[in-house]
Image (cartoon, coloured by chain):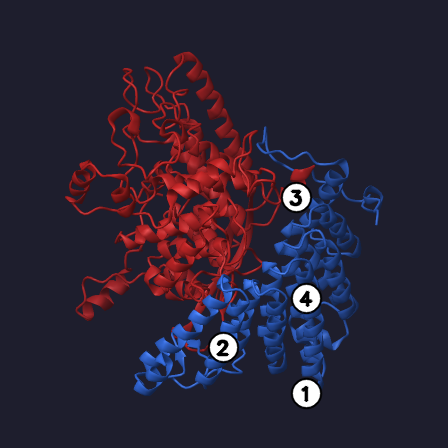
Chain colours: A blue, B red
Amino acid sequence: MTMDIPTIFADIEPTPQDDGPEPVCAISYSPEFVEAHDYLRSVVKIDERSERAFDLTTVCLKLNPANYTVWHFRRRCLIALTAASHASDRLRDANLPTIDLASIEKDLDFADRLGGTNPKNYQLWYHRRALLECLLRVSDGNLPGEESSSGIVKIARKELEYVDKILGDDSKNYHAWSHRQWIIRTVNNSDLWVSEVDYSHSKILSDPRNNSAWNQRWFALHEGQISTRSNSSKASYRGKSILSLEKANDEANYALCGAKVDPFNESPWRYLISVLTEQWRFAQNSGDAGEVSIVSA
Amino acid sequence: KGFVSLDASHPWMVYWILHSLDLLGHFDLFSSFTSNANAKGDMTMREVEAFQKADLLTRVVSTLSHCWSGVCVEFSSRDVQGDDKLRELVRSQEITNKERNKDSGDGTVTIIGGGFGGGPSQMPHCAPTYAAVLALSIVAGIGLADNSSGKVRNDESEISTNKINQNNRNPYREAGELALNLLSEKRLPLYAFFLSLRERQGTHDDEEDERIAFRMHHDGEIDVRASYCILAPCKLLGLIDETAPTSSEKKINHAKGDTSSIISSNPLLAPSIAKHISACQTHEGGFGAEPHNEAHGGYTFCALASLRILNAVEQIDVDNLRGWLARRQMGYEGGFCGRTNKLVDGCYSFWQGGAMAVLDEWDRGATEMKGGGSEMIEGEREKKEEEYEEELDEEEEWERSEISFDEIMLQRYILLCAQDVNGGLRDKPSKPRDFYHTCYNLSGLSVAQHSSRLWLADDIANESGDDSCLNRIFGDVTVNIVGRTDPVLNIRVERVEVMLSQHF
């Protein structure tokens, strides 16, 4: 999309970048870069959160997707544009800034396209989180009871599919795995916790040396509370949830199977040691001699 | 064209390059550790060069000052009343703008805070703020160095460092003062900005379980880097020292019969902050960006260095961390990797190697974190000197090496694999050089050469035969030595010393 910026912003005076006299590390910008950012600075200064301002952020972000200031201003535009067009809607009662569904979908798509060449860009991943937070809020507020929960889960699954796509290119992308954890933790749906254990397993199968997948398995089992000890005062060690003895046994065997595939792979051994250590410490801490003896066996 | 992607990281570029140059002794007039080039040569030439470099440092300060942005932040009146720094800030701003700081009746006060952004007109952000404060500290440290620190290694008649002519003038002094003035001016607004980035974590209503994390910027991501990017500058700017009890606190203590304890009213020292950082430790032993994220070298360094600044290292599973760190050094390559089953990368020379050095420092019982290495008990230094005077064979020396990783292998990786033949350093062979990797490879090299040593190396082995002030060195000790970096703050220990001795 080419934007004839000087014409569209004919009423605005551009603001050149003020680096001061003789700056160090001066970057050699292209003329189009300078033009876009000179006008953006002016627009931000007067805080014009309009359609044309929003389009200008698109131009700037394509030139430098790491400009967190522009991302923030873009979100402010989205919120302002939504507020303007939904002035009479229920949405405004929510008292929290929100963005309409269509815009969210479009921007998730925009972030995806920019992300192609920038899978390690912090701002892109945060933008997805910010958009999804709005989406989850809207889905929660608009739909009643059962429907709302399934609506949220549907959104979550769609986003998890997106992350899976990214992991297809780089199976250890740190942001991607972290994003998965955020989605699952935030939505906190038991089906999603269970399916994440399965997802970790599938990733481990395709590459047993993928330590991120092993870490995800630990996360899903412990934080999902599907196989942890009940929430009594004795149930945690240092405030963290602990696997039930039965599950710990299963996981220890799982890890040993992983280790058999390649005994020189650290991931399953580390996993095994962590499972045992956790049980051992819990047993000692709980003072239950029976527990201790089972663990040592 | 390639640097456009760093347009939101100007202060980073400045810091990476400045710190690299400083480690290479570029600003030392009578360098005790670099090659002979600096020490010998015509005095007039050196004078000219020094003034050119001083001009560069002045430009650095100016560039960074143009990356500063103010931002309005809101506090409850109660929080302001309980915080002497916020009260001072309100007072100072009231003089210039009475309207803005009026208590708005609903119990909130608006303060003009601020921070450094990635470039002019960019929002304040923790990462460029960290880079800018460090870079400015380096300039201040260079310009305001105490004339008694550092000695000349040859037998010329000039006896002090950085005095270049009869007038005993440090050519970097002006730039140093500019840097320090900028830091003094921005110190309290920075503090207000940092506090405004706090975010309560978890859903626990239990106060004891409260965890507080920091965002990287307003409407930005939360991760453990932010804690470090905030605490490190605070340490350098004297914002993290234990504050003296207020008079009402003293009264309460007296009533309880307790005249000795100091209650810290500094919100940065709140236990909930250390709690969040600790929660980022995983079952593997390292730390992730957020709780339950995979253990990763960069975040591990940030977490550990933060805890060290807060004097809260004992809250984590130290043994598990040490094991994880040790396993990150690659047996074959000698460098470090960032996570289990991932590849070696030169930048982890510092993130992991430095983290190990921080842990070693803590382990040796250094009580309070200060710059320049461990604090020593009286008489200990003499005892250590005696020990080092003994002749040791190589194996014995390796066994009593106080550093917890193989420093020779790390140096070897950095010097033989991470260097680009045209200058600069890199991730690994076949990757291109860049300033980030140059900075962190050199920082890692510094840690490998100096850490665990009890004092600053001020004379190199070849003259007196005394190499006790360095770890085992790979290669030619007369050309390979770089400056000594502080493993927590990652600027040279001499610069830290200048900053910590300031009374803001």
Q: Nearer the viewer, mark 2 or mark 3?
A: 2
Residue at 62% x, 42% y is B6
Say which residue appears at 30% left-offset and 36% top-offset: B456
In front here: B197 or B352?
B352
Residue indicated by mark 1: A145
What's the distance in space between the residues labelled 4 and 3, CA to CA?
26 Å
Sequence-wise first label, 4 or 2: 4
Residue B251 is at least partly visible in this image? yes
Q: Mark 1 or mark 2: name the one nearer the start of the chain.
A: 1
User: Do the residues under discs 4 and 3 have CB atoms within 8 angstroms?
Assistant: no
**Callout 2: few (<14), some (14-19), or many (20+) C-alpha neighbours within 10 Å?**
few
Q: CA distance from mark 2 to mark 3?
A: 47 Å
Instruction: State the residue in front, A24 or B19.
Output: B19
Binning the other alpha carbons within 10 Å of mark 3 as few (below 14), some (14 to 19) or many (20 upward) gives some
Q: Residues within 10 Å of mark 4 (few under 14, many from 20)?
A: some
**Residue under label 2:** A253
The numbered dot on residue B87 is: none
Residues indicated by labels 4 and 3 sit on the same polypeptide chain? no
**In this figure, which residue is indicated by the disc labeled 4?**
A164
Whether A33 is drawn above or below A135: the answer is above
Residue occupying the point 65% across, 58% down: A170
Q: Amino acid at mark 3?
A: Ser
> Spatial distance from mark 1 to mark 4, Cα to Cα?
29 Å
